[in-house]
Amino acid sequence: MSSEPNTRLADLFGLAGWSKGELARTVNRQAAAMGHPQLATDTSRVRRWIDMGEIPRDPVPRVLAALFTERLGRVVTIEDLGLVRHGRTGRRRDVEQADNPDGLPWAPERTAAVLTEFTGMDLMLNRRGLVSAGAALAAGTVITTAMTDWLHADPAPSGSRSGDPLHAEPAGFERYEAAPVGLQEIEQLEFSVEVFRKWDAQRGGGLQRKAVVGQLNEVGGMLSFKHPEPLQRRLWGVAANLAVLAGWMSHDVGLEPTAQKYFVIAAHAAREGGDRPRAGEALSRAARQMVHLGRPDEALDLMKLAKSGSGEENLPRTRAMLHTVEAWAQASMGHGQAMRRTLGEAEDLFVSDRGDGPTPSWMQTFKEEDLYGMQALAYRTLAEHEPGAARQAQYYAEKALDLRTDGRQRSKLFDLLSMASACLIADDPDQANRYAKMALAAMGETSSHRTWHRLREMYRLTGQYAGYGHIQDLREEIARVLPKAPTVPRARQA
């Protein structure tokens, strides 16, 4: 027992609005519903958890995580509550708990447990119709500091025998029974990842996010059983791919803290599977999220780790993709010279990729049009600082649009909005109106909140042409179709 107060639990307790007695009674009721009728929590015990840092025995941490998840309307894990025992977290001793509240990096068995617990809570929110809100993102610097040495090192061989369970501790209402799987099942899981990936690219993350999270939850249960090394590594790869998809879909619908947690889970899973390039790509997703949220300096911290931690086996095309994310962050900070240099390096890397070896499945969607699309986005972002960059944004957006023939509707929408915004900055309202109308015509076919965010950015740029006939009509049309910000109940706004 620690004599220090559990500030994390205290903060969430304050947000939830319970009294200590109410929480004790609620814990007992919830535990009985989860199959533990013998639990008898009282007010004094709750006080010791909060004021003295006492960590209750299982199943109480899982019960509390479920209760706070439902009460606050966002995923709350055992880590969030500060109820993880130090002996099983795999926490680096040189990383201060105050700066690294999630105890990154996790040991393999803890990664499987966190994966299963977090997805279980996420699914519970889906079932109850709750809205995930109110959590805070970890700073990019914190993630980078905590994970640098770990990501650069190779994972230790498991040395385990098949049939030796890891005793992971998933939380939530449905505990997946650990059982071995064979090669055929893993191949089917890998195929399902490809199906989910196509769905996401075509229609956005809102429609299939729950299915991906559910599949990831089952894979987490499978990982709690130690398979022969080749199968275990492939299963970690499936977990990494699904976690990236779950994170990207969550980001796509505005669940930002949830998305970041999935990206970190994906990096852990990829590294445990021996796929450091995949771990780097997962971190690059977190970096793109940071740029989107207006935190490009933290994105650059994450990109430094993503690039260095990916290892020498990274293919030129993968390195090109990482460079485009870095360039976007530089553009957001107005660093035009650095952005142009980074994009030049990305082009050189892309054309140097001869396809001599197999391309990872997760990189097969980064094609020539995607390189052009990211260049267009970087120049359009830089144009906010250097208006002359808008012409280059138009050039690359047009090249991307000419090649968009594979049905990835969301990427095409982003290119259309980049083009329309660049046209407005370049004082070409007629062309802007044309591309904006094309974007609006296709907008209803996706469930991506990020497309609405880009549309709002473009709408802001139309303000200087508010009296211009076609643009005034466009502004009115955009105002009609833009969804209103969701209303959050006051208890959850806290």
Image: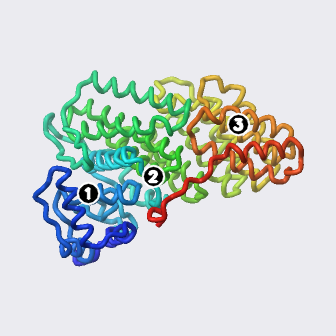
Callout 1–callout 2 Cβ contact below 8 Å? no
Amino acid beneath label 2: Val
Q: Position of residue 264 (x, y in %)?
A: 41, 49
Give the residue at x 86% y 50%: 465
Q: Residues within 10 Å of mark 1 (few under 14, many from 20)?
A: many
Nearer-the-camera pick, 329 or 27: 27
Nearer-the-camera pick, 76 or 223: 76
Amino acid beneath label 3: Leu
Name the quadrant containing residue 367: top right
Separation (CA) of disc 3 from disc 2: 27 Å
Nearer-the-camera pick, 397 or 49: 49
Q: Residues within 10 Å of mark 2 (few under 14, many from 20)?
A: some
Residue, disc 1: 89
Give the residue at x 50% y 53%: 302
Mark 3 or mark 1: name the one nearer the start of the chain. Answer: 1
Residue, disc 2: 131
